[in-house]
Amino acid sequence: MKKPALWLAGLLLTFSVTACSGSGNAPAASDKGAGADPTAATQTKTPGEKEKIKFYTFKSNKPEEPTYQAVQAYNQSQDKVEVEYISLVQNSDSTEFLKKLDVLVAGGEVVDAFMTGNEEELMERASRGVVEPLNSYFETEGVKPEDEYFKVLKLDGKVYGLMGSATQWFTVFNKQHLDEAGLKLPEMGWTWNDFRDYAKKLTTPDHYGTYFHTWGEYANIIAYTEHPNPQLDKGLKPIFDDPSFKYFFDLRRAMEKEDKSVEPYADVLASNYHVLQQFFAGKASMLAVPSYAVRAGLNLEKFPHDFQMVYAPLPRSVDATDVGMTNISGGGLAVGAKSTHKQAAYDFIRWMTKESYKYTKEIPALKNVDGKALLEQFFSENKNLIDTDSLAKTLFDSRNKMPEGTFTVPYGSQLKTIVENSFASFMLDNRKFDDVKAEMTAEVEKVAAANK
């Protein structure tokens, strides 16, 4: 079977808030690192009785929910384990879900398996000892996780989670607007200067050329795609001296103030838009966004539109030497550190990473799946809305690769909030970048020092 060099699509993933509150409600588990013996903590059970484990999720507990369908398929696939599907929210909000899960854990609830909306949410809990390291389970299985997955969720060399699906940032275009402007889809290697030029040419009295959301990623997308960590170097020092920060801050201001090609930041902040709202409403012609936008574009009840989406890679830095630098991200599937069914929980999340995409229609994070074929399988009946050719070309280009040495820190959501607030001050108060940079640096240094 064909193995694309890098495919990362998370295409069915429903949008969830990407930052976690990071509240310290859950105490550190006393059995941190208990993975040394994968079978030692399993409870005895009557012969013939199924071992029961609890799976906590932010996906809805409804028969039509694809994750629910996958779990039921797992239960039917074998006769040794039964997974109880426990949904704590019905709005797919991972932040609200984890707040509730933290309260349960703090109250003594034993969690066998759970999911998170992003890796920072998982790493924050791993740092508190409530997540089981999986290294020994892979060793027992005789599998090196990096050989099977494009990315595993690690902290200090320990694997704490697996991604059921993965998300790649790209640029999505309204094909009608692109054709009306007489523009061709850009190729890999186009720059953010080119992006600015496209935005100007796409802007009309009826719509802006592009849209920037309020998340920390949109303060400097380059930091997320071309650096191992978007705020820190390997020594855990702030990287705001990197030229990409001043460049991107200034780019955002110039596109708003000079080009008038993007909706004003103040209006975006006040309107509380969904990240995809203005694009699907036809108010923005192109959007740099995670690839869950593909599947979201089929939800015509939430995002009514009739134009076809076409796709291109993210722009690169003007002076970048690697044109295919990208970022893989996604939620995590994990085992609770205090579970008494750890082996069963591990077996379950492994199955979910390898089989659930057949129900969710998300492209998994596995290396041995023909992603291009899956796109055709998933969206062959939706080509009026999704151009699978440009999507496949964008996601599966052999030049796609992550920055070397990519790492995550448990307090990443705090650092992201610092950048979000600093960028807001830069835009709303018309401040100088150097002044904002100094404040960002001091605040990030304080957080990093507090977490040593």
Image (cartoon, rainbow, N blue to C red):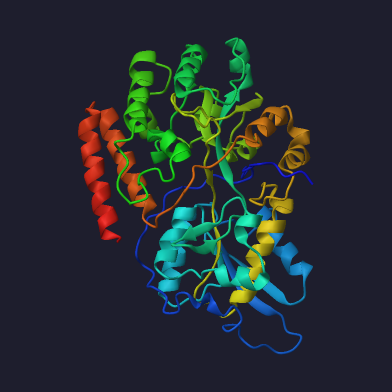
**Relative horizontal placement of residue 188, taking residue 389 as reference (left or right):** left
The residue located at (53%, 42%) in the rendering is 402
Residue 299 visible to an observer of this rendering: no
Please determine whether, in this image, residue 325 is positioned above or below residue 414.
above
Q: Residue at x 32, y 41 (%)?
A: 239
> In this view of the protein, which residue sits in the foreground, 311 or 38?
38
Quadrant in the picture for residue 80? bottom right
On screen, residue 159 versus residue 439, left or right, reads right
Q: Position of residue 198 (x, y in %)?
A: 50, 16
Residue 396 in the image, given as x and y percentages of width and height: 66, 37
Q: Quadrant of the C terminus?
A: bottom left
- Which residue does the image show at 57% across and 29% down from the upper left? 313
Residue farthest to the front? 321
* Closer to us: 312 or 292: 312
Q: Position of residue 358 (x, y in %)?
A: 74, 52
- Name which quarter of the figure residue 54 lies in: bottom right
Which is more toward the observer, 73 or 193? 193
Residue 355 visible in the snapshot = yes
